[in-house]
Amino acid sequence: MSQGPTHEAAKSAALERNLAEALTLEAHELAGVPEVKVEHASRRGDAEVLIELASVSQRYAGEGAAAGRVALENVNLRVFKGEFVCLVGPSGCGKSTILNLIAGFMQPSDGRVLYKGAPIKGPGPDRAVMFQDHALFPWLTVQRNVEFGLKMANAQERQIRKKHARNYLAMVNMAGHEREYPHQLSGGMRQRVALARSLALESDVLLMDEPFSALDPTTRDMLHEQLQRIWMETKKTIVFVTHSLKEAIRLADRIVLMGSNPGRIRREIAVDIPRPRELNSLALDEINIVLRRELQNEHRPTLPVELPGVEYNI
Ligand code: ADP
């Protein structure tokens, strides 16, 4: 029997369920799903450790109820050179805090955050950051926006800079838009320019904080494809924050599942589906369901799980 568009739409709607929704799935919804191998990643042979969080805790000063809030507690994480790591978890579990610590925007309350074995003391050209909000300068053209970071990084001559920026704009399929201004572009195009700007810095590490979450599903899908291709070409080390389990499965070598209150790492899972990964591939579907089952098994018996506006003491 043919499976029409309605079936496909229903299937993708189900797949779009985020991590919080995954926690509410019933066991019978998972019945009959084939098993796939889920490896627990703790070692990567001889690969170089680029970033390390060692016994990191983070408390924010805050006021009133927020005073002394523990955003992270005893987090241990290693990111290997060339790896694509996704931090996944419900809102408030400390994903952005980890990214900000690696970016060097702040120092941990306890523990150590290391880059190539040395403590991170502040932001640096070896770690580019890309946020959900494109943060382009509205008064600069696309070309000048990409060149801007290069000026700050002391790239030499104007001609070299210009060529360099054009190369990276072509890499994100934005060739031909160099002279346009941000207000003339769609949301997806603006994020592609922001990606080109981050890539043009040629940092070893790219830190991405929910960069595609404000985009519509079709644009997000296209950007996932582009990012996969760029990552395969450049072999950058990427730490990517998302609250979407599906996005993480599509992109990551390794998923770091986090929990909240206090923010901590629950589990790390290697995703060994070959790339490029398709949005509707069976393997992606299967691992999504298996991971949701893992979350269910892990969270239900022991934990008070907080979902937005709901509290479960299961
Ligand atoms: P996530 O990225 O997973 O949504 P965050 O890292 O942004 O989580 O936040 C983790 C916790 O730390 C949350 O409870 C949040 O309210 C708190 N927090 C984050 N930034 C600050 C801050 N500057 N001051 C006080 N509390 C903060």
Image (cartoon, helix red, strand yellow):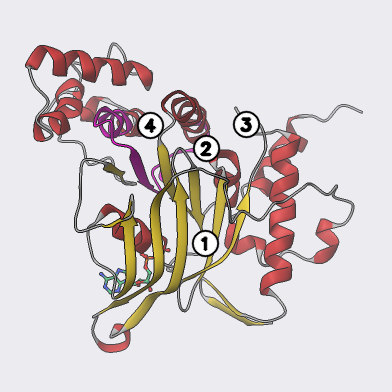
- When the figure is inspected, residue 219 is found, relative to residue 38, above or below; the finding is above
Disc ID at residue 188:
4
Image x and y of residue 248, in percent: 55, 47
Secondary structure state at the residue bearing disc 1? loop
Q: Is residue 53 left or right of residue 266?
A: left
Indicate the quadrant of ligand 1 in the picture. bottom left
Disc 1 residue type (three-letter): Gly
Q: Does the magenta run of residues contain 29?
A: no
Q: CB of mark 3 within 8 Å of CB of mark 2?
A: no
152 and 170: which is toward the camera? 152
Instruction: Tell me how far mark 4 sits from mark 2, CA to CA.
Output: 10 Å
Disc ID at residue 246:
none
Provide the residue designation for mark 3: 277
Instruction: Tell me how far mark 1 sits from mark 2, CA to CA.
Output: 20 Å
Quadrant (top left, top right, bottom left, bottom right) of the N terminus: top right
Disc ID at residue 89:
1
Label 3 or label 2, whichever comes before in sequence order: 2
Label 2, residues with CA under 10 Å away: few <14, some 14-19, many ≥20: few
Image x and y of residue 299, in percent: 66, 73
**Can you tell which of label 1 and label 2 is closer to the viewer?**
1
Label 3 or label 1, whichever comes before in sequence order: 1
Point out the stretch of residues depicted in magenta: 193-218
Q: Does the magenta run of residues contain 201?
A: yes
Disc 2 residue type (three-letter): Pro
**Can you tell which of label 3 and label 2 is closer to the viewer?**
3
Provide the residue designation for mark 2: 217
Label 1 or label 2, whichever comes before in sequence order: 1
Disc 4 residue type (three-letter): Gly
- When the figure is inspected, residue 276 is found, relative to residue 205, above or below; the finding is above
Image x and y of residue 70, in percent: 37, 79
